Amino acid sequence: MESSQTILYVEDNDGDVLFMQQAMKKIGLQNVLQVVSDGDEAIAYLDGKGKYSDRRKHPFPALIFLDLSLPVITGFGVLQWIRKQHSMLALPVVVLSGSRMEFDLNNAYRLGANAYLIKPSTGEDRDNLLGTTAKYWLSLNLQVQGPRSDEPQQPNEEDSSRNRMVPLAESLLAIAQKSLNLAGLQPSNL
């Protein structure tokens, strides 16, 4: 697994991209930002497809800032795609939106956003919010490493995290069976 401090910013507004670049420069993270301008590009970047296949030029991100109003595929579509990828379940996705609509907020969290931030209108607020958020997710939060594109995947290769989960699942199943037995119920499908 590769370690990365890369931030993927999915934003179609050039002004917002410039603000993000300035905020990252102020906190010393100017060389970690990768920008894509629509949802289709975001998925291609994360999947390492097409022009994003070279992970030296386009490293797998440790954090995503995601706008919701995107061309081609919306931010909701990107978020839904990310959370369906087994290797990206723990990838931090911070929605950075101008929308204060309750539907957008609830939908983003329902689809697996880690945070929902409103784009600040002033420079100092923006720099503080983006800088603090980036530092938290890149420095303080424990991270799961992204998939390596240069390692060939074996089709029958066992997933090590799955192997660790089997004993836990077996223990939980045994506890459930004992609980049902104590309650005088017979499990039919366990």
Image (cartoon, rainbow, N blue to C red):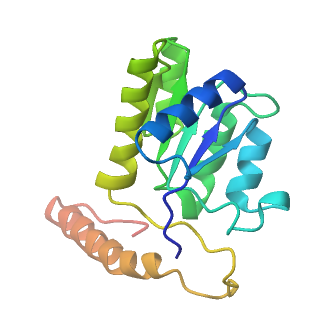
- Locate the C terminus and report the quarter of the image it occupies: bottom left
| Depth order, front residue of 60/153 | 60
Whether 152 is drawn above or below 15: the answer is below
Q: Is residue 166 left or right of residue 179?
A: right
Q: Residue at x 61, y 58 (%)?
A: 85
The answer to whether 143 appears left or right of 101 in the picture is left
* Residue 146 against residue 14 in the figure, above or below: below
Residue 110 visible somewhere in the drawing: no
The spot of residue 148 in percent (x, y) is 62, 74
Q: Is residue 36 visible?
A: yes
- Residue at the image position 76 percent from the left and 36 percent from the top: 38
Q: Is residue 9 left or right of residue 124?
A: right
Residue 180: x and y in percent read 23, 62
Q: Point out residue 156 in the picture as x, y percentages from the top left corner.
A: 65, 88
Q: Is residue 59 depicted above or below 139 in this figure?
A: below
What residue is rendered at 49% in x and 40% in y?
A: 25
Where is residue 178? Give x, y as percent: 19, 70
Q: Which residue is more in the foreground, 62 or 28?
A: 28
Q: Quadrant of residue 157?
A: bottom right
Quadrant of residue 39 within the rendered picture: top right
In the displayed structure image, the side of residue 28 where residue 71 appears, left or right: right
Identify the residue at horizontal 53%, vertical 16% (top origin).
Answer: 103
